[in-house]
Each structure stands twice: as structure tokens, then as C-alpha cells.
Amino acid sequence: MQLRVNPISCVGHGLCAELLPEWIELDDWGYPILNGTDLPPDLLQHARRAANSCPTLALLLDSEGG
């Protein structure tokens, strides 16, 4: 599983980085910078919570390849 951000929907709330700091950093303007590799199984539940908590639904959790 991988996380990705819809850059059009994201407005830089930063909640994702608060909920998943192990995987998401914020740039100087508050927009997420993702690790970009497959999520380790121990972070999957936290990644789901971060994606579900995104105020604009810009954070997406996808299976590999799609």
C-alpha cells in the first residue's frame, strides 16, 4: 500500500503529518511530502486514519499499482 496526495484537493491543513509523522513531513507552506515507498504493515492502520481524517480527502491510500 502507498499513500499519495491529490495536489489539487490539498490545501495544506497539515493534519496528515500530525497523525502520521513517521511517513509525512510538511514543506515550508504546510503541504505534505510523502516518503513515496510502500508503507510498512505496522503503519497501515495509522495511514488509514490519516487518510480518513483529511479534511479535503486529498490523502489517498492505494494498493500498489493503482
Image (cartoon, rainbow, N blue to C red):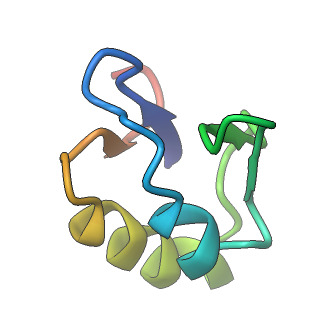
Please state, as top left, top right, bottom left or bottom right, where the C terminus lies in the image: top left
Residue 10 place in picture, x, y as percent: 36, 33
On screen, residue 25 above or below 29: below
In the image, taking residue 57 as reference, residue 8 lies left or right, namely right
Residue at 41% over, 19% down: 7
Residue at 69% over, 41% down: 34
Q: Nearer the viewer, residue 51 or 17?
A: 17
Residue at 79% over, 71% down: 22
- List the single residue furthest toward the front: 29
Q: Nearer the viewer, residue 53 or 64?
A: 53
Q: How many marks?
A: 0
On screen, residue 45 above or below 62: below
- List the single residue furthest toward the top: 8
Quadrant of the rendered image containing residue 29: top right
Residue at 66% over, 84% down: 42
Residue 30 place in picture, x, y as percent: 63, 44
